[in-house]
Amino acid sequence: MKCFLPVLSCLAVLGVVLAQRHVAVQEGPLYRTEGSHITIWCNVSGYQGPSEQNFQWSIYLPSAPEREVQIVSTVDSSFPYAIYTQRVRGGKIYVERVQGNSALLHITDLQARDAGEYECHTPNTDERYFGSYSAKMNLVVIPDTLQTTAIPQTLHKVEQDPLELTCEVATETFQHSHLSVAWLRQRGGEKPAEVISLSRDFVLHSSSEYAQRQSLGEVRLDKLGSTTFRLTVFHLRPSDQGEFYCEAAEWIQDPDGSWYAMTRKRSEGTVVNVQPTDKEFTVRLETEKRLYTVGEPVEFRCILEAQNVPDRYFAVSWAFNSSLIASMGPNAVPVLNSEFAHREARGQLKVAKESDSVFVLKIYHLRQDDSGKYNCRVTEREKTVTGEFIDKESKRPKNIPIIVLPIKSSISVEVASNASVILEGEHLHFSCSVRTAGRPQGRFSVIWQLVDRQNRRSNIMWLDRDGTVQPGASYWERSSFGGVQMEQVQPNSFSLGIFNSRKEDEGQYECHVTEWVRAVDGEWQIVGERRASTPISITALEMGFAVTAISRTPGVTYSDSFDLQCIIKPHYPARVPVSVTWRFQPVGTIEFHDLVTFTRDGGVQWGDRSSSFRTRTAIEKAESSNNVRLSISRASDTEAGKYQCVAELWRKNYNNSWTRLVERTSNLLEIRVLQPVTKLQVSKSKRTLTLVENRPIQLNCSVKSQTSSNSHFAVLWYVHKPSDADGKLILKTTHSSAFEYGTYAEEEGLRPRLQFERHVSGGLFSLTVQRAEVSDSGSYYCHVEEWLLSPNYAWYKLAEEVSGRTEVTVKRPDSRLKLSQAQGNLSVLETQQVQLECVVLNRTSAASQLVVEWFVWKPNHPERETVARLSREATFHYGEQAAKNNLKGRLHLESPSSGVYRLFIQNVAVQDSGTYSCHVEEWLPSPSGVWYKRAEDTAGQMAVTVMRPDAALQVDTVVPNATVSEKAAFQLDCSIVSRSSQDSRFAVAWQPVGGPASLPEALPLALPAHRAAGQPSGHGELLVPRGGVVARPPEGMVPADGGGVGPHRHPCSGHKFHPAVHHLLQRRTLLLCLLLPLPHLRHPHHHHPAGALQEP
């Protein structure tokens, strides 16, 4: 494209080309009555392609608001749907083009079904889709309820008579509407003349014919009641003759502020005939004003007032400063003089007969030399029989002087805006209205300018007199995106639109209007300039932008819900996006992290570390504000911490990019997630329990109340011993029913004896210590921990409480051991048997074991000595006394029945004499299997005296004489005649008579045979060695020092036995030297009875 204009003009054309298409339709809703003729305008601007655009109209009926019903199109005859085709073809619905970019939809006979939402669509002629291609408005069709009635009649009046007529006007419209009522007079085919009217604004008005009479009160309109309107004409004139009727209109105010007559109704007429009283006539001259400007039009009206004017003939002439301008005869053909004839030929002047009584002189373009006096003269003519006219009476009114001023701008400019204070981002709409003083209007060029706070002036857009719009240099880019638009709405009305305003758009907006008038030579010249302005204050979006975080529940309990509100102030409209981010600092940390963001486009973005929140968090943004609510359910420790919301204010730029204006951070909001208030109560009752060992210890721990039915309990059992400072853990059962033994249970070996039980009721826990021991005594108590499942499905300890104590005392069984306390004296002879009996009359337990011990008190020995002892394992032991008195072979024990123990001492000797008694220890097994001595008792004493038998030893005292040769052997016999006891044993000693003799070291001993049958008891013989002494102790007697046979020293002591003699002694051979009868100490062939216990 070639551009021969200046660079700025070329850029302006490009700006137009790149403008955004915008379709505007008449603002709705419109209320129209059935049967009326409605028009709806539609304009398109900012388009590309041909100047003449096409329009297509559709409707969306209330019964199907989503369905488009096509009505009429300027480009497609097949566009209408069937229900509208007939009305479109019949011309009842059509589109009228006003301009290439403007059209009117006409519906001539509006029907109730025509109500709905109308859409005006302009088919695309642009290179690309950019902007809006359709616009919508609503039409509401209401019933026509207006009624106008008057009584039809014919009245005959005489000039100067009064006239009164009434008319009834009523309506039942529910919408707010105004009525206007007018009385009109119609005569023949003339245009109806308005007699008097009451406008919708309650202003009385008359046409020029009746204005003067109305001002004088000769014509009145009165309202009687709510519906009656009365016309009064006090002095009728012949010119008043005609048909009078009243016409009413119902007006409604449209959304654009204009008033529209929804319906008009006229009443039936009243014919009024006025009979004139004479042939007089009067003439008056009228014009609108007296002061004009060059180029303005002027109209003079010469009005004839007479009776029966149509039947009479009048001639009229026009004069200017007493010079004839034109004349007109009864034939109404004007004749102009030469100068005015030229002007009339160029269409600058006109002389005409408007009606029988009105004659007009009109100058379309006044010149300055047209200033002067104007007048008309009316001459009545009478037509003769020959057809000629004869002038009769002539009359003229007073001159009307006018002044024609040179061309001077008389325009006034008024600027209005949709608001004086707006929020950044809102749209600004300015209208610049140009008013003129009534002369023919030229053309206007308009410049919109902004004077900022620093008084700097910049051109926004301007429109030249040819209608070309150009943006200013600093607004070129915004205009190309449709952010700034200027439009000539009407010939004298100009608009400026600032879309998506910014803070820098604040200031004084000025409309600078230049008036242009084409001179006689065809050139345009500036007549004048006017400007008007209006201030605009723009509140920056970030002004007062603040964010506050609040919560009604700063402290919540586990599993409860809580809400966090991010309050954004001020309240921004929906077009102003605010992104809100909730940040979170968990308890115990020092850094915040993003939790969730409500983006400016309404999306939700979760932070990287918000996984635990997603399933339990809802975020909601209020429709009426930018407040964002964060709702968190099932609160836990994870959600405890500090919250903070960060709000970012965004502004959309004219090029659809976004700018972050400001960021605000709220106050810190600390949320404490508290554990539930515990209701745990453990029984505090104290108990004392005394029992015998080996019985079970039954311990109970009762939970009287708990926080939740889902509570789990860990129970720790303790025992406190007086010697310990603190209790020692026995057993712990965790909330998951796992067992853990305490150190005390391990050390004391309690594990096998412990039994834990939880009762079905759930609140009673029992611990049983089986087979109680004395060491189990102590103060027992339980320590209960209440556990709940957190919202994170982790168990936590809510509370703990200690129960009352159970004082347990474990006793050993009461001792019931009792021995027979019978006492006695027993005398026996040596070699007899002594029986000592120990009788247990009662014992503590059948399971006990006894230790039986026999002891003896010897004469002259205060200390007792143990004879024998039977252990609890039934093992027989000899005491120290048994060793001393050679009792080991002579003791015998038997127990013929339970609790009866007998000790036998066989072959008693004198030294066995003493006081004997038994001592019994009762041993019981502890529950752990350890035996302990529970009781002991000593039986009654038994005094035992062992006596020796009387002495009856006699030896044959005959001493034989024998003579033997030296070195020859000889035999000596020693014969015992009687003895003290049959069980006696003898000690025999041989020695020479007269003193000891020296015997040979070794004598041949003749060992006599055993006693032969028939030999007297005690007879034996011995071959005595030469020069020796032979002694034989009784069997079993061991010499104490090798020289005697004791226990007493023998007379033969000091002699050494020959080995052969010693051998004989062992073989019980009696060697007679000196026979000493000794008591029997031990029978060599005595055997213990069956069942006797002997020491090995």
Image: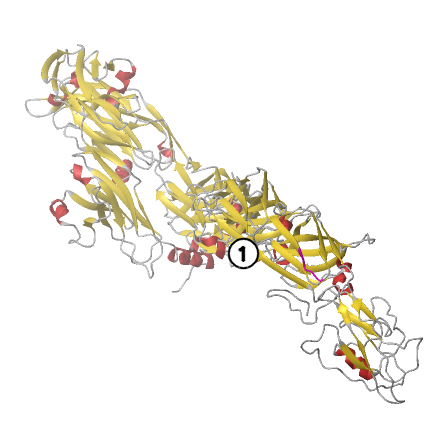
Instruction: Choose between 1010 and 1013: the one closer to the eye.
Output: 1013
Q: Can I make out residue 206 in this image?
A: yes
Instruction: Choose between 563 and 303: the one closer to the eye.
Output: 563
Instruction: Choose between 441 and 885: the one closer to the eye.
Output: 885
Residue 983 horizontal/vertical position (percent):
71, 66
Stretch in magenta: 831-835
Residue 422 horizontal/vertical position (percent):
48, 40
Q: How is the image coloured?
A: secondary structure
Q: Viewed as shown, does residue 207 lie left or right of 645? A: left
Q: Residue furthest left?
A: 385
The residue wearing badge 1 is 739
Is residue 834 located in the magenta-colored stretch of the structure? yes
In the image, is residue 298 above or below residue 583? Answer: above
Residue 228 horizontal/vertical position (percent):
20, 16
Q: Please name the amino acid that badge 1 sits on.
A: Phe
Residue sitting at x 17%, y 15%: 165
Q: Can I make out residue 473 in this image?
A: no
Where, by quadrant of the figure, is residue 404 drawn? top left
Instruction: Choose between 1066 and 632: the one closer to the eye.
Output: 1066
Element carrying mark 1? strand
Point out the image quarter for the N terminus: bottom left
In the image, is residue 22 above or below residue 990? Answer: above
Q: Main secondary structure of the magenta part?
A: loop
Residue sitting at x 30%, y 21%: 202
Q: Viewed as shown, does residue 406 lie left or right of 979? A: left
Is residue 885 located in the magenta-colored stretch of the structure? no
Residue 558 horizontal/vertical position (percent):
51, 45
